[in-house]
Amino acid sequence: MAVALTAPATTAVADTPPPPVTPMLIGGHPAATAPPGITSLQYDAPEHGEQYVDYHTCGGALVFRGWVFTAAHCVIDPPDGPPAARSSMIGRFNADAAPIPTADKKFHVRVGSLDRLAGGETSTVTKIVVHPGWKWGDGAPKTKVYDAAMLKLDHLLQQSTVPLARDAARRGDKVSVYGWGVTEPDSTRSGLPRHLQQLDTRVTSPSRCAAAFLSGDEICADNPSGTDGGCYGDSGAAALATINGVPQLVGTSSRSADPQFCGVQPDVFTSSPELRDWIYHVARTGNAT
């Protein structure tokens, strides 16, 4: 999954082409079961159109019963700037070229369901805590990006949480990515799937994500067959590795090494083990620092 897309709340509008927002899954398959903590991040912004109700925008992971971990670019506006620079920045993170302002979005989550429109548990997001190091990736290569945010929920959920892996995933490790992003290679002509998709891949050489300015707090995930990967709607999506028989969170989808097409290059994932201390700090204090 390399791009996160938002989706309508009803099947009647689910086939409407969604605007490009962030990573999706090309070449995946329907997941047989919902992994622990799987989350669809959605928002309501009806003043911008009736389709923007229960609109899936990104994935996420329930890491504590009251907190969801996702990508920072899913919940914050791009900074103002020259059109060319802004376009390049948005493209790198597969974001909507004309996004609805974050202030107009009322975020909520659906956790623990294969279906992004039904089942599991829902909760309203009451607070967004963005990593203080996040700067929309405007740094030089090797500068840490910190595409990470924690979302506080209005009540504790009864759903299973996903354990945070202690060690960063390494080259060759098997990972499974889960999301509701676009599934067609053209990235624009189909709506989001209702059923959760799964893509099995491996961590690959950091050099293959050099074009995406891979940093020390991130991992590079292969695009199987040279065609498969994340796309619009998959930003913030969970990458899980089975460690000692238990699925554990090793990353969340951030961006693609190719800003134009999904699946043709590897994808960059924020390494959750690298941010483990920060994730716990936010859950304890409610503050970014």
Image: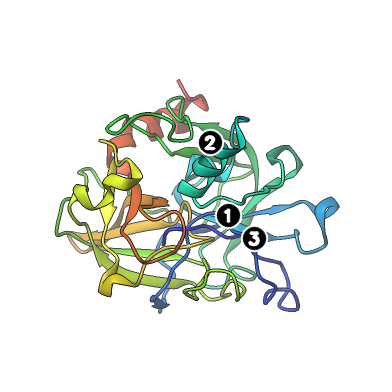
Q: Which residue is mark 3?
A: 19
Q: Nearer the viewer, residue 146 or 226?
A: 226
Quarter of image, res 32:
bottom left
Q: Which residue is mark 1?
A: 21
Which part of the image, by quadrant, shows the C terminus? top left
Query: Residue drawn at (32%, 36%), measured in percent from left and top?
Result: 276
Query: Residue drawn at (85%, 51%), measured in percent from left and top?
Result: 47
Q: Nearer the viewer, residue 44 or 133?
A: 133
Task: Report the Cα–Cα distance between label 3 and label 2.
Answer: 20 Å
Q: What is the three-letter code of the residue carrying label 2?
A: Ala
Q: Can you tell which mark lies on residue 247?
A: none
- 76 left or right of 101? left
Query: Residue drawn at (51%, 24%), measured in percent from left and top?
Result: 287
Q: What is the three-letter code of the residue carrying label 1?
A: Val
Task: Report the Cα–Cα distance between label 1 and label 2.
Answer: 17 Å
Q: Which residue is mark 2?
A: 85
- 109 left or right of 275? right
Whether residues under marks 3 and 1 lie with C-beta atoms below 8 angstroms apart, the answer is yes
Which part of the image, by quadrant, shows the N terminus? bottom left
